[in-house]
C-alpha cells in the first residue's frame, strides 16, 4: 500500500456508520503505588492502596474504542449492561466516545454489568504489573425478553450500517449478547453483497452464519477438525473456510503475523511489525478486528485491510497498562516513517 492509497482509504472513515454487536464490559483499572503498601490489622493480609481509578469500555467496547480512534463517523453499540454502578460507568464511558449512538445499548435490571477489574502496580522505571483480575459476569442464560430486544436493535442498526462487527466474549454459551436468536437475526439480514460483517468469538465460530470469520490458529484448527501449525497449513484451511462461507476469512498468528484468504482460494500473509520494547498483547486482537472492518467498509482490498490491521496491532501492543488504540495519524507514522 502506498501513501496515496492509505489516504484514500482512511479518508472514508468519517463517513462510515459501523455497528458493534456483542459483549460490552467495563474495564476498571486500579492504579496502585506499592510504596504505600500496608498490612491489615484485622486480617494480617497485604493492603494495596489505590491512588487512581480509570474506567473505559472493554470487550466489544475495545473494538469501539479503536473505531473511535480511527475517526469513524458513527458507532452503534448493540449490547447491554446492568442497572448498577458499573453499568452507569460503562454507559458514561461509551457516551464519551465521539459518534456513539446508544439507542441499541440496553440497561437490564436482571443482569450484572460484565466487568473486568484490573489492579496495576506502578513501580518507578518499570512497566505496570497487573495483579490477579477480579471479574463480574453473568452465569445464567440471557432472558428471552432481552434476546428479543437485542435482535430488534440489531435489525434497526443494520438498516443504516456500512459494516457490522459481532463479538462473543462470554465463557458460557447463551449468557451474553450473542445468542442463537441473535445469530438467527444475522442469518436473516446478511447477504452476499452486504457491507462487511466480521465475527469473532472466544468460544469458536462453529455454527455461526457465513460472515467474515476472524480467528486465531487454535480456533481455525477446531473448525477444520485438526490442528494447523505452518503458514501453509493455515493458509489452506483459511482458504477452505473462505470458500465455504463465500466470504473472506482471517487468522491472527501473534508474532508470525496474519493470514487472510478469499473465496476464490487466494491467500495472503502479512508479517508482524518488529517489537520496539516492552509489550502488552491485551487488546491486539480487537484492534485487528476494528481495523479490518473499517478498512473493508471503506473499500480496501483484503490485503490492504490486513496491512492496516497489523500496523494497528503493532501500535497497540506497545501501550502498557491500558487496552490501547491506534489512530490514523499513528498508522500513518508506522507505515510511512
Image (spheres, rainbow, N blue to C red):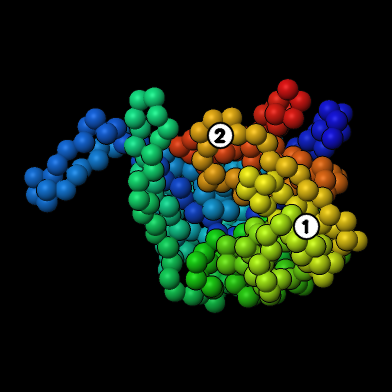
Q: Position of residue 113 (x, y in %)?
A: 44, 58
Considering only vertical position in the picture, is 118 above or below 315?
Answer: below
Question: Where's the N terminus, which quadrant?
Answer: top right
In this rendering, the answer to whether 73 lies above or below 187 is: above
Q: Residue furthest left?
A: 41
**Residue beneath the point at 34% across and 37% down:** 121
Q: Mark 1 or mark 2, which is nearer to you?
A: 1
Pick whichever, 22 or 153, lies toward us: 22
The residue positioned 72% from the left and 49% from the top of the image is 258
Q: Would residue 99 be seen by someone viewing this image from the given angle?
A: no
- Determine the residue located farthest toward the top in the rendered image: 337
In the picture of the structure, the residue carrying the numbered disc 1 is 232
In primary-sequence order, the first of circles 1 and 2 is 1
Q: Nearer the viewer, residue 310 or 170?
A: 310
Q: Residues within 10 Å of mark 2 (few under 14, many from 20)?
A: some
Distance from label 1 to label 2 (Cα)?
A: 29 Å
Q: Quadrant of residue 2?
A: top right
Residue that mark 2 sits on:
318
Q: What residue lies at 59% left-to-right and 38% top-to-bottom?
A: 316
| Label 1: how many Cα within 10 Å (few below 14, some 14–19, many 20+) | few
Left or right: residue 53 compared with residue 78? left
Rendered location of residue 138, percent (x, y) = 43, 67
Q: Is residue 41 placed above or below 196 in the rendered structure?
A: above
Identified at 82% across, 42% down, the residue is 304
What kind of element bears circle 1? helix
Q: Is residue 202 visible?
A: yes
Mark 1 and mark 2 residues within 8 Å of each other at the beta carbon: no
Which quadrant: the C terminus?
top right
Left or right, residue 302 beside residue 92? right
Residue 180 drawn at (x, y percent): 63, 75
Q: Position of residue 39 (x, y in %)?
A: 14, 42
* Camera-nearest residue between 254 and 110: 254
Amino acid at each position: 500500500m502506498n501513501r496515496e492509497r492509505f489516504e484514500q482509504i482512511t479518508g472514508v472513515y468519517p463517513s462510515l456508520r459501523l455497528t458493534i454487536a456483542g459483549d460490552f464490559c467495563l474495564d476498571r483499572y486500579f492504579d496502585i503505588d506499592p510504596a504505600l503498601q500496608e498490612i491489615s490489622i484485622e486480617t494480617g493480609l497485604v493492603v494495596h492502596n489505590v491512588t487512581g481509578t480509570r474506567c473505559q469500555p472493554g470487550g466489544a467496547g475495545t473494538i469501539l474504542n479503536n473505531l473511535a480512534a480511527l475517526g469513524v463517523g458513527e458507532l452503534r453499540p448493540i449490547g447491554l449492561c446492568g442497572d448498577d454502578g458499573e453499568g452507569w460507568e460503562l454507559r458514561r464511558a461509551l457516551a464519551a466516545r465521539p459518534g456513539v449512538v446508544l439507542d441499541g445499548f440496553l440497561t437490564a435490571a436482571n443482569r450484572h454489568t460484565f466487568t473486568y477489574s484490573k489492579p496495576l502496580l506502578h513501580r518507578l522505571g518499570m512497566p505496570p504489573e497487573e495483579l490477579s483480575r477480579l471479574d463480574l459476569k453473568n452465569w445464567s442464560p440471557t432472558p428471552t425478553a432481552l434476546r428479543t430486544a437485542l435482535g430488534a436493535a440489531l435489525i434497526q442498526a443494520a438498516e443504516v450500517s456500512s459494516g457490522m462487527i459481532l463479538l462473543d466474549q462470554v465463557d458460557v454459551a447463551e449468557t451474553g449478547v450473542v445468542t442463537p436468536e441473535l445469530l438467527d437475526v444475522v442469518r436473516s439480514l446478511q447477504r452476499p453483497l452486504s457491507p462487511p460483517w466480521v465475527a469473532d468469538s472466544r468460544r469458536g465460530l462453529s455454527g455461526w452464519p457465513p460472515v467474515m470469520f476472524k480467528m486465531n490458529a487454535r480456533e481455525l484448527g477446531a473448525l477444520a477438525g485438526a490442528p494447523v501449525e505452518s503458514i501453509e497449513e493455515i493458509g489452506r484451511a483459511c482458504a477452505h473456510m473462505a470458500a465455504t462461507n463465500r466470504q473472506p476469512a482471517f487468522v491472527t498468528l501473534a508474532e508470525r503475523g496474519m493470514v487472510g484468504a478469499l473465496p476464490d482460494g487466494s491467500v495472503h500473509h502479512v508479517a508482524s511489525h518488529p517489537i520496539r520494547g516492552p509489550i502488552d498483547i491485551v487488546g491486539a486482537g480487537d484492534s485487528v478486528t476494528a481495523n479490518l472492518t473499517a478498512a473493508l467498509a471503506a473499500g480496501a482490498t483484503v490485503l490492504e485491510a490486513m496491512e492496516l490491521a497489523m500496523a494497528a496491532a503493532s501500535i497497540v501492543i506497545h501501550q502498557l497498562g491500558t487496552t490501547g488504540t491506534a489512530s490514523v495519524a499513528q498508522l500513518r507514522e508506522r507505515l510511512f516513517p
